[in-house]
Amino acid sequence: MKHILIIIFLLAGLNSFSQPFSKSWKDLNYAGDTMIYHRLDIYLPKVQKPSYPVIISIYGSAWMSNRSKGADFNSLGKTLLDAGFAVVMPNHRSSFDAKFPAPMQDIKAAIRYVRANAAKFQFDTLFVGITGSSSGGNMAAMAGTSGKVKQYTLGTATVDIEGSVGPNTAYSSSVDAVVDWFGPTNMLVMDSCGGTDFTHNAPNSPASLYIGGPIQENKDKCLLASPTTYIDPSDPPFLIFHGDKDRVVPHCQSEILYEALQKAHVPSQFVLVPNGQHGPGVHQEPYLKMMVDFFVANSQKKIRN
């Protein structure tokens, strides 16, 4: 019995040691309905403070999953919690549930939920950052460049970017800094600007499914789903990571975003990861530290001002 108690005590200590957060809330619905794709998780750091700056982290799934919140918890989530940020991880509708802009409207609703519930969850909403990987990187970048956009028309297509999901429509869906991990940024040229292992122009590609038709036959709508379309000088700072061996989303996508941000004089940095492929392999220690340093610097600047 003594040995069993010792083992239980040691296991309890290990579990406590491995938990990187002090409080958590799971499966909160940010839209006022019962749908799984409108749920999010919240984590607060171990360090005790009256309030915490917030980072929203969006999973990558080629827009095909509506329930993958927390997929980046062991990489992005833990790193951000250790740095003292509250971390919010939302689900969103997949391209099988609804086409663009509906999934993007969900992310906007999640941002508004954070602001509306700041006191309840100890959020310091003077700083709300956002990050995401792959399709999540696209959506994080979209949140950054379309923060002041309600509706937008391009050619023959008009989209309601902001939407009216959830009860918190009086709150802002803008963000204060963006870290984009290998996200698509101008999907019209994914096949022409770099080599990939499949055809993005195909009618059944993730990009085509996301916008509701072959991207080359729906160019205006495809560009409306691309963050480069909305860039202006008032956009928040960006940090962009992409592997130079990415065969899913070619690294030219991040170069296009970076060049457009630079042209608009938006503070931005692009990091090309040597031998980096598509996926979590780019979430390596030096780059995670760069992400933290970027968010810390921008949060301190925002809070000082």
Image: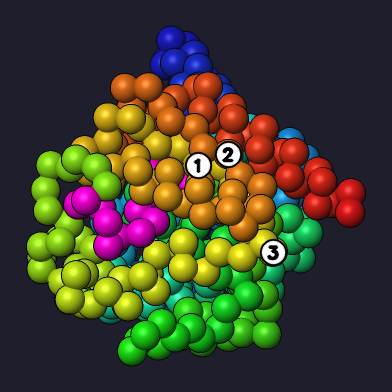
Tell whether position 182 is magenta: yes
Taking depth in this image into account, of 37 and 252 the one nearest to the observer is 252
Taking depth in this image into account, of 108 and 158 the one nearest to the observer is 158
Q: Secondary structure at mark 2?
A: strand
Say what amino acid the circle numbered 2 marks.
Gln
Tell me the CA gap for discs 2 and 1. Answer: 6 Å
Tell whether position 61 is magenta: no
Q: Please report the residue visible at 35 percent of the width from the left and 59 percent of the height from the top.
A: 186
Q: Position of residue 171 (x, y in %)?
A: 68, 78
Q: Are marks 2 and 1 in contact (CB under 8 Å)?
A: yes
Residue carrying label 1: 240
Residue carrying label 3: 234
Viewed as shown, does residue 231 lie left or right of 191? right
Q: Position of residue 288 (x, y in %)?
A: 53, 30
Q: Is the residue 283 above or below the residue 140 in the image?
A: above
Q: Quadrant of the C terminus?
A: bottom right
**Label 1 neighbour load within 10 Å: few <14, some 14-19, many 20+:** many
Which colour style is shown? Answer: rainbow
Q: Are marks 3 and 1 in contact (CB under 8 Å)?
A: no
- Magenta stretch: helix, strand or loop mostly: loop
Q: Secondary structure at mark 3?
A: loop
Say what amino acid the circle numbered 3 marks.
Ser
Q: Please report the residue visible at 30 percent of the width from the left and 60 percent of the height from the top.
A: 187
Residues rendered magenta in the picture: 180-192
Viewed as shown, does residue 145 lie left or right of 70? right
Viewed as shown, does residue 140 lie left or right of 302? left
Give the total of numbered labels: 3
Say what amino acid the circle numbered 1 marks.
Ile
Which of pointers 2 and 3 lies earlier in the amino acid sequence?
3
- Residue 269 marker: 2
Taking depth in this image into account, of 93 and 176 the one nearest to the observer is 176
